[in-house]
Amino acid sequence: MGIRMRSILLLPVLFALAVSGESDPELDWWETTIFYQIYPRSFKDSDGDGIGDLNGITSSLEYLKEMGIGATWLSPIFKSPMYDFGYDIADFYAIQDEYGTMEDFENLMAKAKELDIKIVLDFVPNHTSNESVWFEEALKGHEKYYDYFVWENGTVDENGVMHPPNNWVSVFRKSAWEYREEVGQYYLHQFVIGQPDLNYRNPDVVEEMKNVVRFWLDKGVAGFRVDAIAHLFEVDKADFGGVYPDEPLTRNTDDPDSYDYLDHIYTKDLDETVEMVYQWREVFDEYKAKDGLTRVMMTEAYSSPQMTMKYFGNGERLGAQMPFNFVLISDVNGRSSAAEIKYALDKFLTFKPIDQHANWVAGNHDNNRVSSRFSPELVDGINMIVLLMPGIAVTYMGEEIGMVDGYVSWEDTVDPSGCNTDDPINYWMASRDPERTPFQWSADVNAGFSEGNKTWLPVAEGFENLNVEVQRVTDKSHLNVYKALSLLRTDKIFRYGRYESVAFNEGVFAFRRWYKNKAYIVVVNFRQEAYTIDLTYFEGVNKKVEVVISSIQSPKKAKDAFKANALEILGSEALVLKVD
Ligand SMILES: *[C@@H]1O[C@H](CO)[C@@H](O)[C@H](O)[C@H]1NC(C)=O
Ligand SMILES: *[C@@H]1O[C@H](CO)[C@@H](O)[C@H](O)[C@H]1NC(C)=O
Ligand SMILES: *[C@@H]1O[C@H](CO)[C@@H](O)[C@H](O)[C@H]1NC(C)=O
Ligand SMILES: CC(=O)N[C@H]1CO[C@H](CO)[C@@H](O)[C@@H]1O
Ligand SMILES: [Ca+2]
Ligand SMILES: [Ca+2]
């Protein structure tokens, strides 16, 4: 009887295997595309004021098409006093004047639709601007809006001096509490003073923010990237006798103003935050049920892998399709050995649920560019990893042409993270301006970004060569390598194929992707010295390998064939090879 039961249970499994062996599963748009992050302020200025804008993006969308990119996520375009360049939103339902009008936004959507490019917006749910109507109303004593924020009485010491309610520190240093005379209380800001945290324990806030999501989904956006998600909820003070408790010390630093001074057990990564993500996914899925289009959610959290995976869902409920994988930003750099690279890349693949996709992010508007964190020679190698690893690729604008961090003097520095250091010597280590300099379209004045007399940030050095126009017509250029990778990525091997990786030695990291009996190998040398490697390590590799794509400094050309058991790989060289 035992045996009979087993054969009955096996039948459907075998049937499923037979079916999948013949036809590949259909993949949804977001599972195969490349997401290109545009920082609107720096992409393209259409009216000469030195600031990028929506019309600039609309006129440049064909460039994305040219690269084979099917989706873009835009950093915030909403009304803002710009203390944190749009991450401090004054009106979630309006476009910032200097970026354009709602009509310009609708034109952008129309053009994107024509080109079949999906538009994803940035959702900044943790806080508003201190100049939002909501906060202004709160200050005037309007009770509904008072409850939109997190308020607390100060503590008074024996000398009658008032202090913040507790020891909580903001991500950008110093107390996370700011006193307001009008209210006689402190409000919470996990980021800068101009970014009061919203109170997610108030159901009106939860509903309001869902309405924000619905407002833009109604305008046709294909999803949201959710900013700073880990900071959404703070503990419920009712659970602590009515006062927000002090956070414990990490003992990592003696500086009480430093975010690292405290272990953020009451203000970061709370379970309620994950629950909120599941609720937003339900809103997205309401829309999918109506028109069949999947809306994607990307969540930004610099958290442990265990925590990051919770955003995918919990088995019963769904969450984000793309909890961002930041290992290429947080875990490794140009000094990392091949083994460290392998270890970092394996991390997300190891922890992720088996039925979900990984995603690969090598840069964004908050981190130095790949050419600084790795090296200018490794730009192509990193793009090979981002585009050819199993999963979804995300590219920050400019990484496809190998842009370098701009030099921005102390006088020209505008990022609050840089300015808040009050340090004209070391500000550049905290400033995010260098990775936000204008996009380099051509060798013309202002790198073709703007026809104005000045740009909001100076153009980075090297734009005479590191620009789209020059790289389009240069045979071996970062842009052409990127385009070749983007095309290769559409091959079934990269959509469905399996993955295996190895660190051959201190410098050379390699991985194999294979499907049925076809395979490709990607080899990246993270050191400046040459090595000879034996690729017959990989199953199915015997005599020869053929070059398909090579990094721009590599002397090897497409179609060159090499003996697989003794391939010489030069310093910083990166190759995509076909197995013969
Ligand atoms: C804050 O202090 C006021 C008196 O100054 C008091 O009436 C109020 O109950 C206190 N609020 C909280 C939440 O402790
Ligand atoms: C908002 O906060 C900023 C500091 O980030 C401050 O300079 C500004 O005066 C504040 N505005 C209001 C209306 O409180
Ligand atoms: C740029 O400067 C020139 C000379 O100062 C001036 O004539 C022109 O109007 C300026 N252009 C813009 C777009 O501001
Ligand atoms: C890592 C990080 O903090 N990213 C963003 C979080 O939100 C703040 C405020 O909205 C932004 O300034 C950061 O860019
Ligand atoms: Ca402009
Ligand atoms: Ca919060």
Image (cartoon, grey):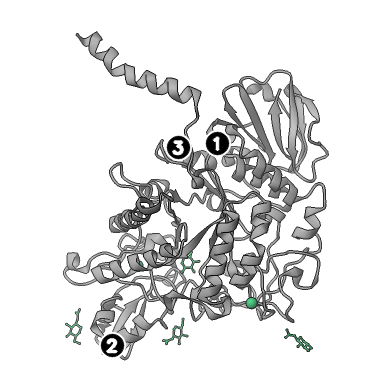
Determine which of the numbered discs, if any, sits on residue 350 in the image.
3
- Image location of residue 549, percent across then percent down: 73, 38
In depth, the one of 380 and 444 nearer the eye is 444
Determine which of the numbered discs, if any, sits on residue 495 in the image.
1
Asked which quadrant contains residue 564, the reply is top right
Mark 2 crowd level (few <14, some 14–19, many ≥20, 10 Å Cα)? some
**Which residue sits at x=73%, y=18%?**
543
- Image location of residue 2, percent across then percent down: 21, 10
- Residue 5's place in the image compared with 323, above or below, is above
Which quadrant is home to the N terminus?
A: top left
Sequence order check, earlier mark of 1 and 3: 3
Sequence order check, earlier mark of 2 and 3: 2
**Which residue sits at x=26%, y=88%?**
141
Determine which of the numbered discs, if any, sits on residue 183 in the image.
2
Q: Amino acid at mark 3?
A: Thr
**Residue 466 in view here:** no
Q: Amino acid at mark 2?
A: Val
Q: Is residue 523 left or right of residue 222?
A: right
Mark 3 crowd level (few <14, some 14–19, many ≥20, 10 Å Cα)? few
Determine which of the numbered discs, if any, sits on residue 76 in the image.
none
